[in-house]
Structures are given as structure tokens and as C-alpha cells.
Image: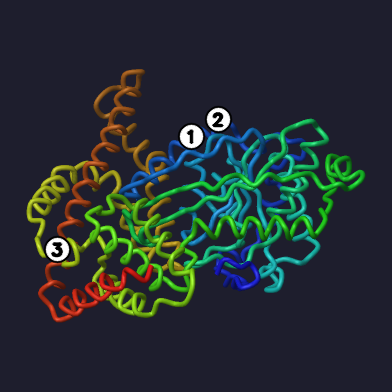
Amino acid sequence: MSDMQDAPDIEPELSSGAMKLRRKKLDNLPWDHTGRHPGNPYFWKIILILMGVGLRYIFRRSHYEKIPDFEGGRVISSMHINGLVDPATLVHSQDRRIISMGRHDLMTMPLIGWFSRRMGSQPVIRKSEIENGVSDEEYARKINDRTLLTMTNCIASGYNAMVMPEGKSHQDPHLHRFKTGPMRFALNAASIAKHRGLPNPALQPVGLHFRCYHWFRTDVFVEFQEPIPVLAPEVSGAPERLSSGKWEEPPSDQVHYLRDTLFSSLSEVTPDAPDWGTYRAWHLIGHIKANTSNSQLKSFRDEVLAAREVRAALSEGQTKEDLMAPAIEAAKILNDNQLDGRALTGIKLDSRIAWTKSAIGIFLMILMSPVTIPSTGIQAFFAWYLGDRTDEGIDARTTYHFLAAMFSPILFWLPLSIFTAFLVHPPSLLSIAIAMSIMLVIHISNLVFLFGYDCWSDFSTSRRRAKLASSDRGKRLEELILDVKTNLNLL
């Protein structure tokens, strides 16, 4: 799937939010064509803290590689399968302030829109929204050109821009066809940077990997490819026209070259599989191969890289059906039981039940519940309820989990802490200190509660594993794993 021409080109289904065009808010949204960031720099520091809390709550294990050093601005790009969790994870991995662009309603809807506007995020009206009558072409062009010029000038000034080049969130384990917007404003940013004597920008491919992207408390691994430098097109007068606030289309051949280069580089750090069943099979083969050589995969990062090695080996020569057929069937059996290659000890299912983790998990959750449930329980319930019933797709499920965790400190903990502090002590500097201490206690309590939840999850996993091991499907699974081991020489 790493060929751009073979990538799916499917316009997104519009959610109820995307069908609402709030023109007044879009017209008044902050933008800037001088290179200054349109967001609030003080608010940016607050949003980083809130995002950090949200990501800490929804991810169990996180591994972020260091972003490569680069002096100029960068266009940060990744595969987009996990709703708002994707951009939040990208922001958390960066070395400088970000400017982003996204669906128009994300800038105008209640709460999220308020935060987005203060972050300096810029709206886009997509082709599918024009075709469905949400906006006319003239207004869409006005908003989109304004957004592209804002992004262009910020990148030229050295800021990082965050863009999902597929233009939508989807649920496939391979890239969809790229839109040209990121390449167009990257080239124009290079023109402005050269005109102003600033460093050239670059495209920065980022690999976002989730163990299961729609699960609460999943694992994440973030990796970076080498930056792709963007050189200024040789178009007479273009930098001056762009600097004056007039959008100018860069040469199409350079746009398409950059698009294909980014697609190729980004494909290397995505699953790049025809379907999720095949990708899970690659992971399973990686586990079996490692277990056979007594070098068990110890982290999700190890699993991703092992699966990539399997993918590379299978891409050479003919299809290895004797290896892939049993691996796909075995991976499906595991996935049907919410298990994966970690369930294996050698080539056998681990049938031990984690009773100790059960006791620890129950104890910690009960111990912390008097603090966690009143402070965070209501929003956690609604995140679960709404996430399972949204019309945004399964990728929006963890978006609700993330938003509930991210906004809890300011919408729930802060008023609760102030109210409690004023009950304990009359309004004063001491009561403010008490309120801050209460918020810290809530956060620590939630982290301990989540650790207990993780222990309980491990216990539940061990029960499913033991139940499968004693079943006919478990016996079939072990036969398939033996077949995979026998055919590892095909790699």
C-alpha cells in the first residue's frame, strides 16, 4: 500500500457537527499573515499541562522518541486513525509551539472551539462539505486561503505546523490518498523563509502507533523519520505576493513530488497492511520469532519494530502462504478473545491466573474511590456513554475519554477544590494553597486508581487467556502457532 496511486481516495462521511457552519465565529477567528502565531502564548502552556493529564490517563504505557534536530519550521504529519487523540499526541511530542489546521467545526463548537481558537488553530472547509451544501465555494475559498496563508507564514517563522495530510480520520491500517494542502503551504513557506533570510522548512513524518486505538488505557509509541527539507520554488515575485497577503499556488510538479515523498516516508512508519487481521498476524509472527530465539519482546515499541521486520521480509519475493495463513487464523483467535502475542509463553498459552493483581487492583480502586469517584466519576461515565454512541465513528471513542480527562482539572477539580477549601478555611492565600493541594491529591488519587484498574485488567486478561487455553479453540491456536514456528524459515 506504500504507492500513493493505489491509496484509497474516499471523502469522509459528515458528522452532525461538520454540517453546522458558524460563519460569524469563523470570520472572527484569530489569524495572522505576518508570521506571528495567532494563539495565546500563555494559554499554550496551560493547554500543554491539560493535554499531558489527558494523555496520562488514557494511555497505560507511552514511548516517545526524540524529535530530530531541525532549525526551520516543520510540517508535522502522521496517519490519522484516532480522532483528537492523534493531534494531542503529536503536540505532546514536539519541541516548540504548534499551529494546526482542522475541520471548521472544531474551531467553533462549544468548549473545544474555545480552546482551539486560543491555541491559534485554523479552520478548513473541506470538499465534501462544499458538495453537501454546508458552504458555497466562494466562502470556502476565502476561509481556506486565509488558513493556508496563516500556516505558511508561521512555518516560515520557525513554528511547527500540525497537519493530517489524509484530511480525515479513518479506521484502516494504511494511508489514504493525501490532500495537497500541506505540500502547498510548505513550498510557499520556503519561498517566504528564503525571502526573509530564514532557515528552510521541512516535512516531518511521524509514526503514531497504538496497541488498539479505540481502547481506553492502550499503549502508544511515537517515532520520527528524518525531516524532508523543502526548497523554495523558483517563481519570480511569489515571495512578495505571498508576503502581501495574496495566496499563490506553487508549481504543481513540486507539490506532487513532495506529496509522493512524504507518502513514501510516512508509509514506512505506519502499519501499511491491507487489513488489521494481516497486521495482527505480523505482530504475532514477531512474538513467535522472538520467543523461539529466547528474546521476548519487552515493550510495545519492540512489537511494532518486530512486525515491521516481518512486513519487510514478506514483501520480498512471493507470498508466504504457508506462514501467513496460520498466522492470520491464530491472530484472529487471539483478537476474538481480546488477546495478542503477549499471551504466549514460548509457543504455548500462559494459563496462569493473576490472582495477586486482582487483589491489588480491587484494594487500590476501593481505597481511592472516595476521592476519584466524586471528582472524576461523572465525567468518566459520560465519556464512556457518549464515546460508545457518537456518530463520529469508532475513532472518536477515545476522543471522549481524552477530553473528559483533559478538561477535568479546570471544569471539575478546580471548583470542587475551591469549594472544599473555603469550607475548611475562610478565603485567603492559605485557602488557595489548600485548593491547589486538593487538586494535587485528586490527580494522585486518580493515578493510583488507574494503576488499580490496570491490575484488574491484567487479571481479566489472565482469565481470558486461561479460559482459551482450556478450550478447543485454544488447542487449535497452539497447533497454528506450531505451524507458524515451523515456517519461520520462509522469512
Mark 2 secondary-structure assignment: helix
Number of the label disc, if any, that sits on residue 461:
none
Residue positioned 66% across, 70% down in the render:
128
Which residue is label 2 attached to?
42
Q: Position of residue 440 (x, y in %)?
A: 30, 32
Q: Amino acid at mark 1?
A: Ile
Q: Position of residue 400 (x, y in %)?
A: 41, 57
Number of the label disc, if any, that sits on residue 350:
3
Q: Which of the two residues, 97 or 282, is positioned nearer the viewer here? A: 282
Which residue is label 1 attached to?
46
Q: Label 3 crowding class (10 Å Cα cut-off): few <14, some 14-19, many 20+?
A: some
Colouring scheme, one of rainbow, by chain, secondary structure, one colour: rainbow
Mark 3 secondary-structure assignment: loop
Query: In the picture, which quadrant includes the C terminus?
Result: bottom left
Q: Amino acid at mark 3?
A: Asp
Look at the numbered discs 2 and 1 and tell me whether their residues touch, using CB distance below 8 Å: yes
Q: Amino acid at mark 2?
A: Tyr
Quadrant in which residue 38 is drawn: top right
Dot 2 or dot 3: first in sequence order is: 2
Look at the numbered discs 3 and 1 and tell me whether their residues touch, using CB distance below 8 Å: no
Question: Relative to 168, does residue 184 appear above or below in the rendering?
Answer: above
Q: Which of the two residues, 412 or 487, is positioned nearer the viewer here? A: 487
Residue positioned 13% across, 78% down in the render:
471
For marks 3 and 1, give the one nearer the viewer: 3
Q: Marks 2 and 1, how far apart in space?
A: 7 Å
Residue positioned 41% across, 59% down in the render:
309
Query: In the picture, which quadrant includes the N terminus?
Result: bottom right
